[in-house]
Image (cartoon, rainbow, N blue to C red):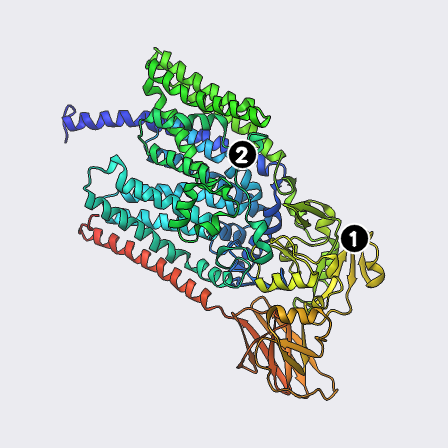
């Protein structure tokens, strides 16, 4: 028994007494942050769900399809509902391998899943930022400032409404940095490996969200953080250079290996798709190249107009605090690194090429190709740095009490920056907004008051007041962000009703099983110019007329099949096909049928049987029979549309664009002749007897067709060709040709046969094997260490 006055007892009681206020402060601050988070969530889902263009027209339909397939224990490899069929698991934005989306949309009804998804990411961002600040040594109030500044910043709050890929990326950044920080500073190899595994998982989720530009920026941030904390940070000077280098290298290599293993199930099918897409190698191709290379701030152009409504706004109080953070913290709490991150992001976000751009392009592989597409997106990894700098400044401020001269000198930093901008803006006929001046004034006032403070008990009120001011600033800005949503605005909807199929879509659903026809919506009046390109439908995603046409990927929700779609990633062959069909290119996001393409023979080979149009659209109703009309939408039938499968007895060799152009001229009758991309098989002329090709089973990754023909020919299937699609005729493998530069065809002997197409992607299989093997290896390693400890053995140290 330890005596009551023993030194050890006294020391432990003293430590406990010191920890108690800190724990209480954490409880208070975490509770306050939870209240702020609930308020933010209520603004997005209370009374209705706020939606934006990408969430409503891309991600929610895709995630719904993902959840539907996973509930059936199917691997969602192919989506037959858009672009006449396209890879799904290979689509970088499909949600495949993104765990929060897979869980929420599999386990919950769609409307509830959306709310759960939004709540998860806001909490992940806010509480992740708070935890990161605390781990870096920032006190509870400063960490609260960090959590609020990050969660309510434009890239988190505003982008959660419109742009799931972006909010997914930024939500995982704090978790990644926490894991790297812990991995670098752990002495135990077991503990270090655990944190490396969490870092690898976080990075794998970033890759699952946005392989390419978004994950490249996060990888740059993570790599820079490992180098700084492992090699350069004074906190680690207790280790020698050799040990620091070993820890840094091991951490970087270990996290990279675990990331690659966990992400393989998503990466490999996406790389397979990428090679054949309009984004091959990370660069938009041909007609899509120019509109994709844009964005960035430009010297001489003000970014202060409507600053609080901008989705990149992080708060004027936050920015002013970040500006003085390095001075207040004296370079502690990793503020030199995060200051460098902010400055680097600001420069790289410019539309002009600076020396930093030139250096980055020379050193970083493929960085130029990716970064030139909306370079301001690099700010995604800069906002956690701004939030941490602001929190560190709030935390450090009380330690400067009474140091008037020092704080007055520091106050010159935000004063000088604000003055410089105010003077510079006069040359572009603009003025610094009051909110920006107000933020600088608040921080300058806090510095002055701290310098004048003599009563220590009153000092905590200054950081608390700063937190309140930055919160009010961001809450007001969030309201303006909602009112001024980009890309068609933000709209509050009753989600279940909004996602219901229109009467016309229900009519199509009743016309037969999947795989028998395709449709497209058409209303050229629903158009808007975007960067000089005419864009159909997606900017009017909340318009009832638009919804009634079942465009904007709604076919994915309804289980019907559209030959149009909205997705920045498409098969290049489909991009070429639609361009030749229309006789003109369109914005790289879209594959829509334009007025110039309504009579194209290319439409017929896509099995385009129905067209949805508004009743008031003149001309078309006379040309095509009406089969449904509810006063809002008219469904027209296209008698010239070919069936899903048909048999021909003549073939010519022509591939790619050449085959598409030959078909477009009308010199080739696709009912009689097929143009294929390889040697022409031996065939016989038809004996003018009845032939048939009937789809007897249609699933997304498996199609069975029963055929009957008197002579040898070719079965042509109005399904997009892709290397993973394999065919058998009566169980015997058959070569699949690409017909008309886009769809599938197989040689067909005379007689009655069963032709089966199956999606069999080696990339998907290998990716799944690697990911599962990585999970098993990690689990067995941790289980082995646990067993080792139970037997009283000491695991090796780092």
Determine the image quadrant of residue 586. Answer: bottom right
Disc 1 designates what residue? 614
At x 40% / y 53%, what residue is drawn? Answer: 365
Q: For this view, does 299 lie left or right of residue 486?
A: left
Nearest the camera: 553 or 298?
298
Disc 2 designates what residue? 40
Rate crowding at label 1 as few (under 14), some (14 to 19) or many (20 or more) other CA atoms within 10 Å: many
Answer yes or no: do the residues labelled 2 and 1 have beta carbons within 8 Å? no
State which tag comes first along the sequence, 2 or 1: 2
At x 62% / y 57%, what residue is drawn? Answer: 556
Which secondary structure, mark 2?
helix
Nearest the camera: 476 or 578?
578
Q: Is residue 489 visible?
A: yes
Nearest the camera: 450 or 414?
414
Specify the farthest residue to the right. 622
Considering the image in quadrants, where does the N terminus appear?
Answer: top left
Which secondary structure, mark 1?
loop
Q: Is residue 503 above or below residue 305?
A: below
Total marks drawn?
2
Where does residue 705 sit, x and y in percent of width and height?
63, 76
Where does residue 532 sit, x and y in percent of width and height?
65, 46
Q: Is residue 498 above or below residue 399?
A: below
Q: For this view, does 370 lie left or right of residue 507?
A: left
Where does residue 736 sit, x and y in percent of width and height?
56, 76
Q: For this view, does 614 lie left or right of residue 655?
A: right
Rate crowding at label 2 as few (under 14), some (14 to 19) or many (20 or more) other CA atoms within 10 Å: many
Where does residue 570 sit, x and y in percent of width and height?
57, 59
């Amino acid at each position: 028994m330890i005596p009551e006055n023993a030194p050890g007892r006294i020391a432990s009681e003293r430590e406990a007494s010191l920890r108690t206020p800190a724990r209480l402060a954490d409880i208070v601050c975490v509770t306050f942050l939870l209240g702020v988070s609930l308020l933010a969530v209520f603004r997005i889902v209370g009374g209705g769900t706020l939606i934006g263009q990408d969430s409503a027209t891309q991600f929610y339909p895709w995630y719904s399809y993902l959840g539907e397939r996973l509930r059936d224990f199917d691997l969602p490899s192919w989506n037959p509902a858009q672009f006449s069929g396209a890879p799904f698991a290979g689509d970088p934005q499909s949600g495949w391998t993104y765990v929060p989306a897979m869980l929420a949309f599999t386990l919950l009804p769609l409307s509830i899943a959306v709310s759960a998804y939004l709540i998860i990411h806001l909490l992940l961002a806010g509480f992740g930022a708070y935890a990161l600040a605390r781990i870096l040594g920032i006190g509870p109030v400063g960490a609260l400032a960090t959590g609020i500044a990050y969660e309510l910043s434009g890239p988190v709050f505003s982008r959660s409404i419109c742009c799931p890929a972006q909010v997914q990326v930024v939500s995982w950044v704090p978790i990644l940095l926490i894991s790297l920080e812990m991995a670098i500073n752990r002495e135990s190899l077991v503990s270090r490996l655990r944190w490396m595994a969490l870092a690898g998982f976080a990075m794998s989720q970033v890759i699952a969200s946005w392989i390419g530009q978004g994950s490249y920026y996060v990888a740059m941030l993570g790599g820079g953080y490992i180098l700084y904390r492992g090699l350069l940070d004074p906190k680690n000077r207790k280790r020698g250079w050799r040990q620091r280098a070993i820890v840094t290298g091991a951490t970087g290599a270990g996290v990279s290996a675990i990331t690659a293993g966990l992400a393989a199930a998503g990466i490999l099918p996406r790389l397979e798709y990428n090679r054949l897409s309009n984004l091959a190698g990370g660069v938009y191709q041909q007609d899509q190249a120019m509109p994709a290379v844009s964005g960035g701030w430009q010297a001489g152009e003000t970014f202060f107009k409507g600053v609080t409504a901008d989705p990149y706004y992080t708060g004027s109080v936050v920015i002013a605090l970040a500006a003085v953070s390095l001075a207040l913290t004296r370079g502690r709490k990793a503020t030199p690194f995060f200051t460098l991150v902010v400055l680097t992001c600001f420069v790289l976000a410019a539309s002009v090429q600076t020396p930093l751009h030139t250096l980055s392009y020379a050193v970083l592989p493929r960085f130029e190709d990716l970064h030139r597409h909306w370079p301001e997106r690099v700010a995604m990894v800069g906002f956690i740095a701004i939030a941490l700098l602001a929190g560190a400044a709030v935390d450090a401020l009380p330690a400067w009490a009474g140091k008037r001269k020092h704080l007055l000198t520091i106050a010159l930093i935000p004063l000088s920056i604000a003055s410089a901008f105010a003077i510079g803006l006069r040359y572009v006929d603009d003025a610094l907004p009051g909110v920006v001046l107000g933020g600088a004034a608040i921080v300058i006032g806090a510095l002055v008051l701290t310098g004048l403070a003599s009563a220590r008990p009153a000092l905590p009120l200054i950081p608390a007041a700063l937190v309140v001011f930055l919160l009010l600033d961001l809450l007001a800005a969030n309201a303006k962000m909602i009112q001024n949503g980009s890309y068609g605005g933000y709209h509050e909807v009753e989600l279940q009703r909004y996602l219901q199929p229109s009467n016309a879509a229900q009519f199509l659903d009743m016309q037969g099983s999947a795989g028998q026809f395709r449709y497209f919506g058409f209303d050229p009046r629903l158009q808007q110019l975007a960067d000089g390109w005419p864009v159909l439908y997606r900017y009017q995603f909340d318009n009832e007329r638009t919804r009634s046409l079942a465009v904007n990927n709604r076919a994915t929700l309804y289980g019907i099949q559209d030959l149009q779609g909205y997705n920045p990633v498409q098969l290049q062959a489909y991009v070429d096909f639609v361009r030749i069909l229309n006789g003109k290119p369109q914005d790289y996001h879209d594959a829509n049928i334009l007025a110039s393409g309504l009579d194209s023979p290319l439409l017929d080979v896509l099995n385009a049987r129905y067209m949805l149009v508004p009743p008031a659209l003149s001309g078309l109703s006379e040309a095509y029979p009406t089969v449904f009309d509810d006063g809002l939408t008219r469904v027209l039938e296209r008698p010239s549309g070919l069936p899903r499968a048909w048999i021909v007895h003549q073939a010519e060799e022509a591939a790619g664009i050449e085959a598409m152009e030959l078909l477009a001229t009308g010199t080739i009758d696709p009912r009689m002749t097929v143009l294929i991309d390889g040697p022409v098989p031996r065939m016989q002329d038809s004996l003018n007897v009845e032939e048939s090709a009937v789809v007897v089973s249609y699933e997304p990754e498996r199609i069975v067709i029963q055929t009957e023909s008197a002579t040898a020919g070719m079965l042509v299937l109005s399904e997009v060709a892709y290397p993973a699609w394999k065919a058998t005729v009566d169980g015997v493998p058959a070569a699949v040709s690409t017909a008309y530069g886009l769809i599938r065809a197989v040689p067909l002997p005379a007689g009655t046969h069963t032709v089966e197409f199956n999606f069999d992607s080696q990339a998907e299989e290998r990716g799944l094997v690697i990911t599962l093997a990585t999970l098993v290896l990690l689990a067995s390693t941790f289980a082995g260490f646990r067993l080792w400890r139970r037997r009283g053995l000491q695991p090796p140290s780092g």
